[in-house]
Image (spheres, grey):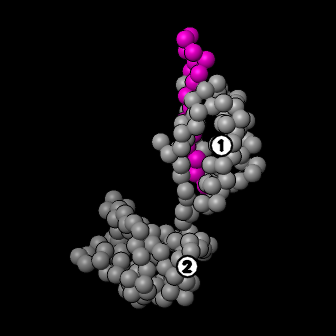
Amino acid sequence: MVNVDIGAQMLVNAELFVKDLPGQLVGSLEPISLVDGNIMGVVHNRERIVNHRICLNVTFEVECREKLDKLQSIWKSKDVIISKMDSVYRTFTMEYLLIGKIDGPYIENLIERASKQMTLDAIDVRYSSGSAISDKRTGMISVKTLSEEDMDKFDSFLSSECKKSGITYVRGI
């Protein structure tokens, strides 16, 4: 299993199969609190049944590997089947509106240069077509990074590039 440290916490995603009996859902989630874990999300998938067991997907934070090992041991003693357990990436997302003389090649070049300076996990770009009245266009850029540091770098980069090109830049749409 690969661990992702978030501060002093590991963010973990587990796919469990629990018996289709009353109390099994609660019984499989309670051990997370016994190891001082914090549940971030739960999906109880009643359509996914294997050997009379229902799929449960849970995302949680836990302090250390030892507590995670203890949790796995508790689940096994409660006859909870751990189908999959892996890390979850926490991403940082920001949206930007650009207004000015922009087009596809300009934005592609901008993103290419930014990605050489920082790690961009995902980028979604949309921009308007030009009009007969004005040569200005609008563009929306949605960026995901794996760290706040990379998000700060992208903010600085985009702000500087827009200033140089005379493009209006709005952060946090």
Q: Relative to 165, is 28 above or below?
A: below
Name the side, left or right, on which 110 lies relative to 29.
right
Residue drawn 54% across and 39% down? 170
Residue type (three-letter) at the residue carrying disc 1: Leu
| Disc number lying in front (2 or 1) | 1
Q: Which residues are magenta?
A: 129-145
The location of residue 53, given as percent across then percent down, is 35, 71
The location of residue 113, given as percent across then percent down, is 75, 43
Q: Relative to 163, is 75 above or below?
A: below
Q: Quadrant of residue 26?
A: bottom left
Residue drawn 70% across and 39% down? 161
Specify the label residue 8 is tagged with: 2
From the image, tell me which residue sits under label 1.
Answer: 158
Farthest residue, direction top = 132
Q: Quadrant of the N terminus?
A: bottom right
Specify the label residue 45 is tagged with: none
The location of residue 9, given as percent across then percent down, is 53, 77
State whether residue 82 appears in this view. yes
